Amino acid sequence: MLCEMMKACTLCPRECGADRTKGQKGYCKVGDELVVARATLHMWEEPCISGEEGSGTVFFSGCSIGCVYCQNVNIARGLAGKQITVERLAEIMLELQAKHANNINLVTPSHYVPQIIEGIKLARSNGLSVPMVYNTGSYEKIETLRLLEGYIDIYLPDLKYMDPEPARQYSGCEDYFTYAKEAIHEMVRQVGTAEFDEQGRMIRGVIVRHLLLPGYLSDSKNIIKYLYDTYGDTIYISIMNQYTPLPGMSEYPQLNRRITEEEYEELVDYAIEIGVENGFIQEGDTASESFIPEFNNEGV
């Protein structure tokens, strides 16, 4: 059983060693019981992920990164959600497919990889056929990602930082880029160049997301250049402007504001100048609560 890997957990780069099978909680704030806070159709992903029908998102509780500005802070800290079995996870996937979800979108799944694999196996044996999306902050070990080969069709990773200083200050992992770049390389190796169906929905591939943070335009440009220089048109790059300062951000004054239109436009223009064509941008007032769903156990 893959869950044996949680006896001295090293699933993520934190390698906290917690015996999650005995009720200990890891750095991720959860044990070995699946905890899910929401499972519904979601319309706010990239257009090729949400499509017309919506993406079948499953929001897992806990997180191995713990960014201070996280919009999903209640579930990231393990403060919301309902314990479920692997069998129930498989049922949820099938229920979302029955609602015409374009895919099953596993949000913040890294600390549950063993259970997720078992859930996918069970769901597929009972008729699950839509693509599987792995939606992650990218602080991943490639050894864990390799377990997912053949189970994941679309990878939707963040690339948050290149500079180790904001990675340390805001996410407690100055080695973030070291792990994230290797993780994304492994994701691209597994699923290759993006593929779409006749309706323009992604069925295979990698979309790397980058959220522009206030005051870190230079690091953002370095990230976009790194991704394009490394992968060209093999991947899609999603440049996001929805950063929203949460209550309590006065402790981090540089992050205690939204980004300006000028900052975002400069980053998008830079991406275009260096040749990025396979990309997504956000328009309008996306830094709003409409992107933060209620984690009320709906669909769980």
Image: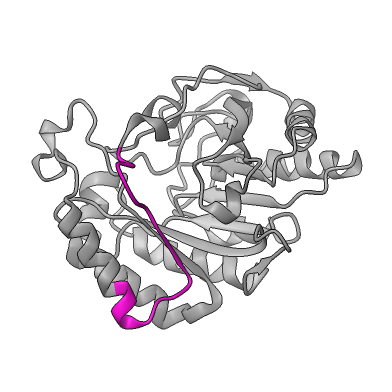
Q: For this rendering, which residue is in front, 243 or 201?
A: 201
Magenta segment: 271-287
Name above or below for residue 77 compared with residue 49.
above
> Is residue 103 rendered to the left or right of residue 170?
right
- Give the percent coordinates (x, y) of residue 123: 83, 39
User: Does 278 appear in magenta?
Assistant: yes
> Is residue 86 rendered to the left or right of residue 74?
right
Q: For this rendering, which residue is in front, 48 or 218?
A: 48
Residue 174 figure quarter: bottom left
Residue 54 figure quarter: top right
Q: For this rendering, which residue is in front, 282 or 235?
A: 282
- Give the percent coordinates (x, y) of residue 210: 37, 58
Residue 21 seen in the current view: yes
Residue positioned 58% across, 31% down in the render: 20
User: Does 172 appear in magenta?
Assistant: no
Q: For this rendering, which residue is in front, 251 or 282?
A: 282
Q: How many marks?
A: 0
Q: How is the image coloured?
A: one colour
Residue positioned 51% across, 46% down in the render: 45
> Which quadrant does the C terminus fall into?
top right
Name above or below for residue 196 compared with residue 127.
below
Residue positioned 31% across, 46% down in the render: 284
Residue 158 figure quarter: bottom left
- Give the percent coordinates (x, y) of residue 198: 73, 63
Residue 1 seen in the current view: no
